[in-house]
Amino acid sequence: MPEEPPLVRQWMLLRTLSARHYGATIRELGQERGVSEKTIRRDLETFRRAGFPLEETAGEFGKKSWRIDPSKSQPGLTFAFDEAVALYLGRRLLEPLAGTLFWQAAQNAFKKIRASLGAEALRHIERFGGMFHQTMVGASDYSQKADMIDLLMQAIEEHRAVIMAYQSLRATEPVTCDVYPYGLAYHRGSLYLVGWSPDHGEIRHWKVDRIAELHLEELRFPPPEDFDLKKHLASSFGIFRGSGQVRVEVRFSARVARYVEESKWHASQRLTRQKDGSLLAAFELDHTEEIKHWILSFGQQAEVLGPAQLREEIREELTEMAKTYAQTKKTRRVSKAPSHPPQRTP
C-alpha cells in the first residue's frame, strides 16, 4: 500500500478514533495505516497539542487503547435544529470537492442529519432549499477528477513535484511539464493550480480542468518562505497575474451604477458616485486582461477613462465586434433572397 500523505493519514486516524467506542491500540492503528508505531505516536501527540479530546484507556493486561472521548467531543458538536437544517441545505456548496476524501466525510455527516430528521421532515425542508439556488453556469465538474485533486493536495502538503500533461486553451495537444505545486485557487466555479514552473523560471497558473494526466514525483522542493497564495493573487482581477502595476479607471452609467456598488469586485476598488448618478471606479491591478472582459460585459454602460492602452484595446474590440455583426446582417439579407426570380402568372 503506498504511503499516505500526513494530512490524509491523520484524517483517517481521527475517523477511526471517533468511531471505535473501545478505542484502538497504537499497534493496530499503525498496521491499519501502514506506518510505524513511532509515526502513530507522533500523530497522537499532534492531536493532543491541537486540543482534540484524546483519551487513553487501559484494558486487560494493561493494554492501552486510544479514542476520541465522546463525553467531551459530543457537546461541542451538537447543533441546534436550525443549524443542522442550514448545514444540510448548504451541502451543494461543497460540490467542487466532489469525489474527494473531504466530500465523502461531508456526505457521511449529511447522511446522519437526514437520518435524525426523518423522511417527512426532509421533504418539507427541501422546500426551504427552493428559496436558494446556486447557478452552475460555467462551473466545472470535478466528479471524475477526485484522484487527481487528491494527488495535487498531497503534492502541495509534502512539497513534492508533479509531472503533468497539460493542454492549454489554444493548444491542440497536451504538453508535458514539471510543476512545483504551491496551492489551489477556486475562481468562478473552477479550480486552478498555482505553482513554480522550472521550465519558465516563474510562478504560473494551470486550470485543473485542462490537466490530462498527473504523476506525483519523489522529488521534493523547498517551499518559498515568503509565499502567500492570497497575497499572490491580491493584485489580480481574478486568477491571472501580470508583472506590471496599472491603475484602471472606469465610468459606469447611472443605469448600472447601483449594480456595481453592490459587489466587492476587487480589494483595491474605489467607487465614487457622481452628481449625474454615474459612478467612477478605480482599481490598482497588475494586468488588464481580465478586467477588460469584465468591462466589455457592461456594453455601452461602461467607459474606460484610463489607461489609454486599455481604452484603445476595448475600442478595437468593439470595432471588430461591430464588423462581425454587420457582416452577419449582410449574410442574413442574402440568405433571405429567393434563389430564383419569382415567376409571373400568365
Image (cartoon, rainbow, N blue to C red):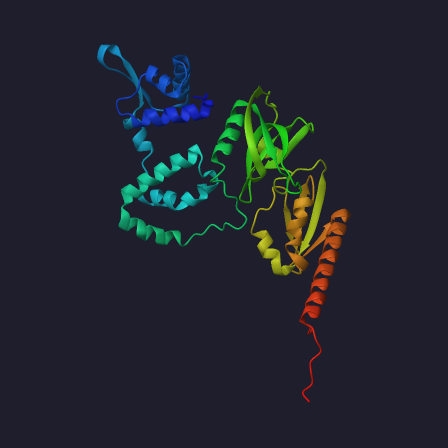
x and y, in percent, of residue 65 in the image: 29, 17
Q: Which sits in the foreground, 279 or 52?
A: 52
Q: Quadrant of residue 299?
A: bottom right
At 50% across and 37% down in the image, what residue appears? 145
Q: Name the residue furthest bottom.
A: 346
Up the image or down, 210 lies above or below 8; here it is: below
**Where does the image place residue 120, in percent across and percent down from the top left?**
27, 51
| Left or right for 31, reference 179 | left
**Number of labelled discs?**
0
Q: Farthest residue toward the front? A: 346
Residue 51, x across and y down, in percent: 39, 23
The N terminus lies in which quarter of the figure?
top left
Q: Is residue 133 left or right of residue 322?
A: left
Q: Is residue 300 above or below residue 99?
A: below
**Residue under the image location 45 percent in, 42 percent down:** 95
Q: Nearer the viewer, residue 211 or 227?
A: 211
The picture quadrant where one finds residue 343 is: bottom right
Q: Is residue 132 above or below residue 27?
A: below
Quarter in which the C terminus is drawn: bottom right
Q: Of residues 44 and 148, which is closer to you in this image?
A: 148
Near-viewer residue (329 or 75): 329
Residue positioned 42% across, 37% down in the render? 103
Image height of 242 relative to 72, above or below = below
> Along the horizontal axis of the image, is 251 left or right of 36?
right
Q: Residue at x 77, y 48 (%)?
A: 308
Q: Residue furthest top?
A: 61
Decide if residue 120 is in sight here. yes
Q: Position of residue 108 (x, y in %)?
A: 35, 37
* Residue 280 appears in the rendering: no
